[in-house]
Image (cartoon, helix red, strand yellow):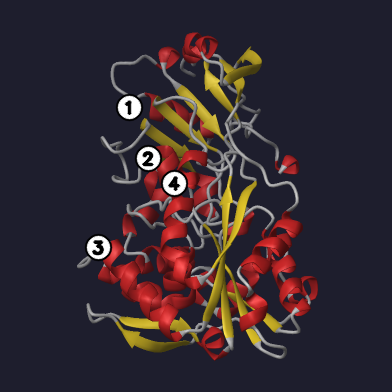
């Protein structure tokens, strides 16, 4: 017999964010600003990095960058820059960016995908510095990437241009050694030492930093000369932290996540958003949200079976587990020295069974009084479904708007939940 559940509302969060309206025009102005034409000569080859994250407008950003370099009579090409993603193979990594619309046909340039690296230096800590062979052989390298809080590490620099130089262009070999080194040295020490070597020895001509707003849109793009990478990325990280989308409430008994994947976050679902950055299964005093239990309902198509991050949840369903490619998931989890992120939660045949089981583990709160939030993923948080137990707080806040409700939690005839958005909307 089904337990009593609270009714639900669909609400909209109104975030304060900036949105970039003319992306091509901005990129052209930014790349002109750092005087690339004075360094990049006609006929010079330029490697452009593209990572594994599902960055908004990444195909347009990459194509505009390619066209700008062509206007200088340079010879640009694209390098898939990711550690062990795509199964740790050249073909798999090319397939990842193809899923974002980045192919030789759409970009009009070569895509040179390889797992081969060159060891260009050794840091003072004794760490070999790996760098993508194709990028190393280019006359110049342009580092393109999104700046945002890292899902595990804390510092002035987290995820962005520096990480792209380390993990992205370090490929599988570099990612393995750097993540191992984090067990002995701080993230900050490693990032500074490796970045210094890369900037000195690998012909980095500049960076194109992307910051997304709270609605998973392009909020800011800035071209940065190599000597300013550290200070500018530090400043952009502060903006990214302010713009990071958030769950609507600080205390949640049960969070339902419709989908996770590497195109959503390096950790499948952003640990900064769900309050699991410092501990896989509990909030700490450093997190801004406390979630008791998490359920994952599916993997994105773009993650190609990589279920990294499922280990941050306590509950899931059988169809999600059936979709896991264990080979690429294991490679990614071990490369990142985070094996617990791939551990399997409790598995149930239907969503309803998982929901009822989860609500039996949240303490003295009765299921009908529980605080439930259902989200599409940790990038798309503008519209969410929440239990009626939040109604008083919703009515007291200007940043929350009721769109519909109250209604029963949306289970279908198979006892599975309806996602916050149907896939055709995304």
Judged left or right of residue 207, residue 3 is left
Q: Earlier in the sequence, mark 1 or mark 4?
A: 4
Which label lies toward us, 3 or 2? Answer: 3
Task: Name the residue carrying label 2.
Answer: 314
Which label lies toward us, 2 or 4? Answer: 4
Q: Tell me how many marks there are.
A: 4
* Residue beneath the point at 49% across and 19% down: 2
Dot label at residue 238: 4
Vertical arrangement, residue 215 with respect to residue 40, above or below: above
Disc 3 to disc 1, how far (Cα)?
36 Å
| Badge 3 vs badge 1, beta-carbon distance below 8 Å | no
Q: Where is residue 138 shown, x and y percent of the image?
A: 58, 88
Dot label at residue 361: 1
Looking at the rendered structure, the secondary structure element under dot 3 is loop
Looking at the rendered structure, the secondary structure element under dot 4 is helix
Which label lies toward us, 3 or 4? Answer: 4
Q: Quadrant of residue 295?
A: top left
Q: Quadrant of residue 26?
A: bottom right
| Badge 2 vs badge 1, beta-carbon distance below 8 Å | yes
Q: Quadrant of residue 274?
A: top left
Q: Where is residue 59 shown, x and y percent of the image?
A: 71, 62
In depth, the one of 225 and 349 nearer the eye is 225
* Residue beneath the point at 75% across and 51% down: 22
Looking at the rendered structure, the secondary structure element under dot 2 is loop
Disc 3 to disc 2, how far (Cα)?
29 Å
Q: Earlier in the sequence, mark 2 or mark 4?
A: 4
Disc 1 to disc 4, how far (Cα)?
37 Å
């Amino acid at each position: 017999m089904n337990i009593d559940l609270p009714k639900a509302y669909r609400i909209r969060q109104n975030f304060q964010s900036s949105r970039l309206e003319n992306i091509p025009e901005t990129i052209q102005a930014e790349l002109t600003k750092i005087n690339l034409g004075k360094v990049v000569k006609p006929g010079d080859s330029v490697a452009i990095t593209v990572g594994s994250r599902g960055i908004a407008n990444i195909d347009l950003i990459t194509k505009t960058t390619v066209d700008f370099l062509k206007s200088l009579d340079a010879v640009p090409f694209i390098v898939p820059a990711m550690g062990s993603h795509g199964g740790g193979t050249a073909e798999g990594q090319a397939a990842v960016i193809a899923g974002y619309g980045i192919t030789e046909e759409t970009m009009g340039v070569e895509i040179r995908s390889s797992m081969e690296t060159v060891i260009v230096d050794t840091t003072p800590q004794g760490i070999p510095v790996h760098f993508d062979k194709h990028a190393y052989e280019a006359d110049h390298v342009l580092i393109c990437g999104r700046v945002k809080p890292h899902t595990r590490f804390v510092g002035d620099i987290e995820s962005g241009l520096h990480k792209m130089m380390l993990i992205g262009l370090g490929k599988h070999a570099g990612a393995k050694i750097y993540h191992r080194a984090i067990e002995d040295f701080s993230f900050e020490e490693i990032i500074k030492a490796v970045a210094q070597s890369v900037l000195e020895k690998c012909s980095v001509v500049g960076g194109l930093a992307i910051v997304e707003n709270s609605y998973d849109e392009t909020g800011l793009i800035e071209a940065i000369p190599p000597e300013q990478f550290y200070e500018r990325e530090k400043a952009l990280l502060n903006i990214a932290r302010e713009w990071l989308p958030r769950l609507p409430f600080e205390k949640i008994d049960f969070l339902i996540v419709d989908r996770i994947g590497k195109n959503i976050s390096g950790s499948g679902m952003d640990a900064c958003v769900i309050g699991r950055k410092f501990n896989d299964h509990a909030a700490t005093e450093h997190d801004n949200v406390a979630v008791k239990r998490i359920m994952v309902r599916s993997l994105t198509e773009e993650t190609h079976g990589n279920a990294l991050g499922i280990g941050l949840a306590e509950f899931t369903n059988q169809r999600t587990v059936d979709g896991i490619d264990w080979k690429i998931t294991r490679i990614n989890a071990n490369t990142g020295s985070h094996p617990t992120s791939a551990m399997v939660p409790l598995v149930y045949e239907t969503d309803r069974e998982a929901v009822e089981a989860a609500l039996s583990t949240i303490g003295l709160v009765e299921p009908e009084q529980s605080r439930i939030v259902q989200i599409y993923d940790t990038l798309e948080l503008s519209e969410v479904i929440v239990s009626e137990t939040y109604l008083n707080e919703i009515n007291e806040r200007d940043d929350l708007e009721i769109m519909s409700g109250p209604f029963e939690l949306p289970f279908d005839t198979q006892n599975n939940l309806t996602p916050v958005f149907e896939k055709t909307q995304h």
